[in-house]
Amino acid sequence: MASDRVRVELPEPTLCRSCGTDLGGTLAPGTCPSCGAPVEMPTASTAAPSGPGAPDAPALATHKHPAVEMLTVALPTVVTMTSYTVMQFIDGLMVSRIGADGVYLAAQGNGGMAMWLTISFTLGLTTVINTYVSQHLGAGTPERGARYAWVGLYLSLMTTLPMLALIPFLPSIFAMGGHGGRLLELESRYAQILFFGAFFTLGARAVAHYFYGMHRPLVVMSAVLLAQVVNVFANAVLIFGGEGPGEGMSVGPFGWFFELTASFAGALGIPAMGVAGAALGTLLGTAVEFLIPIAIFLGPMNAKYATRAAWRCGWGAFKNVLRIGWPGGLMFVNEMACWGYLMAVMLKAGGEAAAVHAAGGPGVLTQAEVTEAGVAHNAAGWIALRYMHLSFMPAVGLSIGVTAIVGRCMGMGRPDLAAARAKLGLQIGVVYMGLCAGAFVIFREPMVRLFLPEGLSSEETARMVSIGAAVMIAAAVFQVFDAIAIVLSGALRGAGDTVWPGVATVVCSWTCIIVLGHALIVFAPQLGSMGPWIGASAFVIVLGVLLSFRFAGGKWKTIKLVHDDHTPKQPDPGISGGNLPGEA
């Protein structure tokens, strides 16, 4: 028998106020089918306005289980961040096949470091584009997020212009660091090409944060994956030309690929450019990474969100980005400085101190023997760092997704949902990096051996494995805390809470990595490079604990970033308001 209950069509999905169950697009007076709580009928005063002049409710994602929602937004960013790590590995592998001389990899590393250090502040500054765009999305005003993408583009241009003026002076800058000869020539050329294409790198990241905030990360992921295909092919063509990899250089099962690219280069008369070719390949790939999302931003997105008209973004949008974005910029510069100093200086110094201590004091070993010990500790540290990248880069992608989801919830005026989604992201991050920690401990020795070059003596191999395995254990200790710090920093950024985490990061990194690390080198030289790694581990652990307290304190829930100063908009119905499994 047909029900005689009256059904009312609702303008948007409705949630039970008691349990959060999605009641669908229609509602019958009575009780919630899940918890039995009474359900109120919508009235003329509560129903969404309709007709000409009514505000537009954003037609966004349908209701999803929170875990599905998290994976939909975060998984593409995880793939994107992981692909960057894989690309760095492939780039280094190709450069290493130019010849047996280590000068090529050193030149690539130094030139790349100069580039990233120069743009690091702007990269950190523009991460809050995600925050503002996602909060406007949640508030029902997604068209107002486009101006923040333009702010990012303008900041990218403002950073690039002085970098272009700096290009002729790069060789002199490298020479000030004591570099010379072939290394100076190669690293300067590599850096000059990257500096020339800096706008593509910065612009691509700025526009990417817009799409992250709009919960459309597939646009970025697709662009990045295609860009990396272009990068690999261009690298092979431009590095080796028609000659292919250097004589005696192993290319494993990819000989067919290098034969193909060599034929292509030969047909076009492209010469082998070596390290400069690697830089040009990176520039071409980065250009593709920028052009695809900017075309979508100015094309299809314009029809719905008037993205082109937002080019007159106004000083207010600049001030907003600068106001909460400067701590992110400071954190990026600080990370580059502290971790770079750890890897380039402190690990070598720790290894040398251990060798002198083991010999019974200074003057027993020759300078060459001391230096050799330092190089071994440094090399083992770089091997371990490659695996750490595979651990924390996916977590960084998860953090970007959490920023977008928390920002959207905060724009909806639902800090309770923001907290629940942040906790879900934290659970995923902790499980993943916890598994990585287990792998670091169980497989530490074979993981280190994988990167050891052929031809090492058994004694040298044993020493490198011993040092590297110890570092892998140190890395395993802080993996879970690193997950906490990475995910919660993203959650706090989504809410606009950036100053406190930024200052805490800078103070803790200098206190633990630099001060404690150097103190252990001096007062516990027997630890070798483990002294600095203990300092780095302490930094990650302390930061994870501090950010946990900051998040649990809840002050971020009171931050208001998005102010609707025009026609009121409907709150965003696109995020499920349901409780997570197990929540009260």
Image (tube, rainbow, N blue to C red):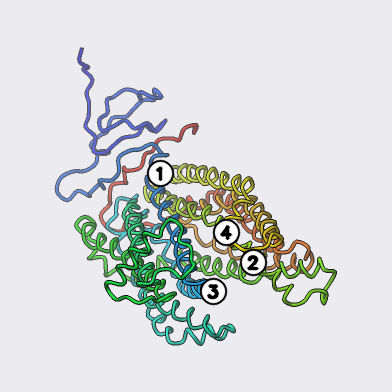
| Disc 2/disc 3 C-alpha distance (Å) | 18 Å
Would you place residue 148 above or below residue 26 in this image?
A: below
**For the residues bearing labels 2 and 4, Cβ distance under 8 angstroms:** no
Say what secondary structure mark 3 lies in.
loop
Q: Residue at x 42, y 30 (%)?
A: 19
Amino acid type, mark 1? Leu
Residue 518 spot, x, y in % from top left: 71, 68
What is the spatial separation of the Cα atoms under label 3 and label 4, in whole angstroms? 17 Å
Which residue position is annotated with label 3?
A: 101
Q: Is residue 131 left or right of residue 545?
A: left
Element class at badge 1 = helix
Task: Classify mark 4: helix, strand or loop.
Answer: loop
Q: Amino acid at mark 3?
A: Asp
Furthest residue to the left? 52
Name the residue that disc number 2 marks. 378
Q: Which residue is mark 4?
A: 451
State the residue lying farthest toward the right.
Answer: 360
Identify whether 259 is placed above or below 577: below
Q: Which mark is residue 119?
A: none
Instruction: Give whichever of discs 2 and 4 has the lower sequence position.
Output: 2
Q: Does any portion of residue 348 appear in the rendered image?
A: yes
In front here: 59 or 244? 244
Q: Residue furthest front?
A: 248
Nearer-N-terminus badge (1/4)? 1
Q: Nearer the viewer, mark 2 or mark 3?
A: 3
User: Which numbered dot is residue 71?
Assistant: 1
Residue type at mark 4: give it: Phe
Label located before the other in sequence (3 or 1): 1
In three-dimensional space, the C-alpha distance between marks 3 and 1, rounded to whole angstroms, equals 44 Å
Q: Residues within 10 Å of mark 1 (few under 14, many from 20)?
A: some
For the residues marked 1 and 4, what is the alpha-carbon distance in whole angstroms? 33 Å
